[in-house]
Amino acid sequence: MRSCWLQFGILAVAFTVFDLSPQTTALAEQAAQRAPQVESRMTLSIETFCSETKLRTSNARLRWSIPQTALSGIGAATVSAARQSLEATVYKNGFEKNLLVSLPIGAATADRPIVPQAQGRQPLPRAFQLRLIDVQQPGATAEATAAGEMTAVVENLEPGVTYTWRIAIDTPSGRIVSPSAASEARVCPADMVQGTAVPRRKK
């Protein structure tokens, strides 16, 4: 009798593991459709550095490019014409778990930065309080512009924390993302001396 129950239990486990019901298959297909497609031809590199103008401020410079063939496939003449965003996470599998922040890529300056759009976390943790302060096309030649090269500078990283980055592009046929790249934020000592006001002499 015990052997019979044991065989029944094994069969039950087998049916549970290999459940290929229409409902299960439909859920798997929906999850696959929601997941963004990775554009392997996109390249992304990260350079971390300390701000030259702000004390103890860790920054990152991101460079990415998209081949012209890939741009044609998403219906954009240049990469700057595409609707892009910079996404960052500090968690393991953070992109898959929706533990990330998104910075829309647009005109940004240190005086008018672009701040994150939280994805499922409010309020933002300290590591996610990033600011996009510069976006530009670094190439000075027509070839570089055609290659879809862009750079962005992000400030206010949490020192010593490892960030994982990616570029996301919304297209008429769906959302594509670049391969992710990780970098550790610099620890920036206060090696700059702030000017002190000299008191005026009384006459």
Image (cartoon, helix red, strand yellow):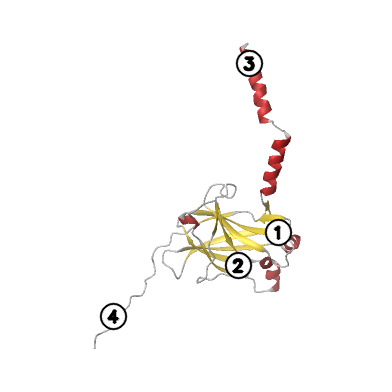
> Is tag 4's residue or tag 3's residue first in the polypeptide sequence?
3
Disc 4 element: loop
**Label 4 sits on residue:** 199
Disc 1 element: strand
| Horizontal arrangement in the rendering, residue 91 relative to residue 169 (left or right) | left
Q: Tell me the mark number nearer the camera, choosing from 4 and 1.
A: 1
Q: Viewer-proximal residue, 201 or 159? A: 201
As drawn, the residue found furthest toward the top would be 1
Image position of 50 with respect to 160: above or below: below
Image position of 25 with respect to 198: above or below: above
Considering the image in quadrants, where does the C terminus appear? Answer: bottom left
Q: Which mark is residue 5?
A: 3
Rendered location of residue 54, percent (x, y)? 43, 68
**Label 1 sits on residue:** 171
> Is tag 2's residue or tag 3's residue first in the polypeptide sequence?
3
Q: Which mark is residue 116?
A: none
Residue type, label 3: Trp
Q: Tell me the mark number nearer the camera, choosing from 4 and 2.
A: 2
Residue at horizontal 68 percent and vertical 40 percent from the top: 27
Considering the image in quadrants, where does the N terminus appear? Answer: top right
| Horizontal arrangement in the rendering, residue 31 relative to residue 182 (left or right) | right
Q: CA distance from mark 4 to mark 1?
A: 59 Å
Residue type, label 4: Pro
